[in-house]
Image: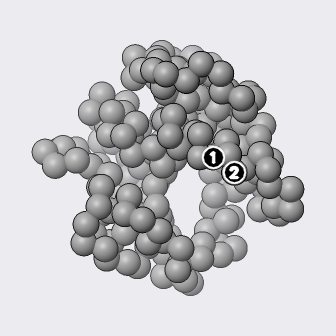
Amino acid sequence: MRELAVTQNITVDGVVEAGDWFAPADGGDEVLAVLRDQMAQADGFLTGRTTFEQMRGFWPAQVDDTTGITEYLNTVQKYVVSQTLQEPAWEPTTILRGVDDVRGLKRSEGTQIVCTGSIALAHALIAADLVDEYRLFVYPTVVGTGRRLFPDGTTRALRLTACTSFGNGVAQMIYRRTD
């Protein structure tokens, strides 16, 4: 069975969506090296429609990207969860119609599937108990308000499997489900 990892940029107070709060803390070469390693482990990239459309409007047009992110996103098998999208217009992409399709995707052949951004989708995946690993890039910022990774009322027992701090103050915390 394939594993599903949720990767998020997150503030110290748990906010994942509140404007452009992580721009001041440049990820730098250390964070980029971790991202490259994670990209090498994953053969599936999962997003919701809004995130997919935002990425589709940006990444394919990047021609001077030396990070490897453009090449990865343009070639990795992408999965977009949407009830309305008909044509992805960014290959290779498969449209999934809901969480049940993600459950089926986890049962398919392959390595890891990574969900990045897409907080509404992340909430649905968490509620359906489909997430095997949480990769949190914790930024040294407190914003006080905004959407959080875990909605109110969510309970989960997680096990910390890795913690890395970077020179710019960002830390990566990796948590896995306990069962």
Residue 58: assigned label = 2
**Image: 97 above or below 132:** above
Tell me where residue 102 appears, x and y as whole percent: 46, 23
Of all residues, the one furthest to the left in this rendering is 153
Q: Residue at image x 61%, y 68%?
A: 31
Q: Nearer the viewer, residue 118 or 53?
A: 53
Tell me where residue 105 appears, x and y as whole percent: 52, 20
Tell me where residue 167 appears, x and y as whole percent: 56, 84
Q: Residue at image x 47%, y 68%?
A: 20
Secondary-structure class at tag 2: loop
Secondary-structure class at tag 1: helix
**Relative to 28, is 100 on the left or the right?**
left
Q: Contact, CB < 8 Å: mark 1 with mark 2?
A: yes
Colour logic:
one colour
Label 2: how many Cα within 10 Å (few below 14, some 14–19, many 20+): few
Of all residues, the one furthest to the right in this rendering is 63
Give the amino acid type for the residue marked by disc 1 in the picture.
Met
**Image: 35 above or below 100:** below
Residue 150: assigned label = none
Give the amino acid type for the residue marked by disc 2 in the picture.
Phe
Q: Residue at image x 46%, y 61%?
A: 9
Q: Name the residue under label 1.
A: 55
Label 1: how many Cα within 10 Å (few below 14, some 14–19, many 20+): some
Q: Residue at image x 31%, y 76%?
A: 142
Could you tell me which quadrant the C terminus lies in?
top left
Tell me where residue 90 appears, x and y as whole percent: 72, 32
- Cα distance in 3D space between marks 1 and 2: 5 Å
Kindly indicate the quadrant of the structure image that contains residue 79. top right
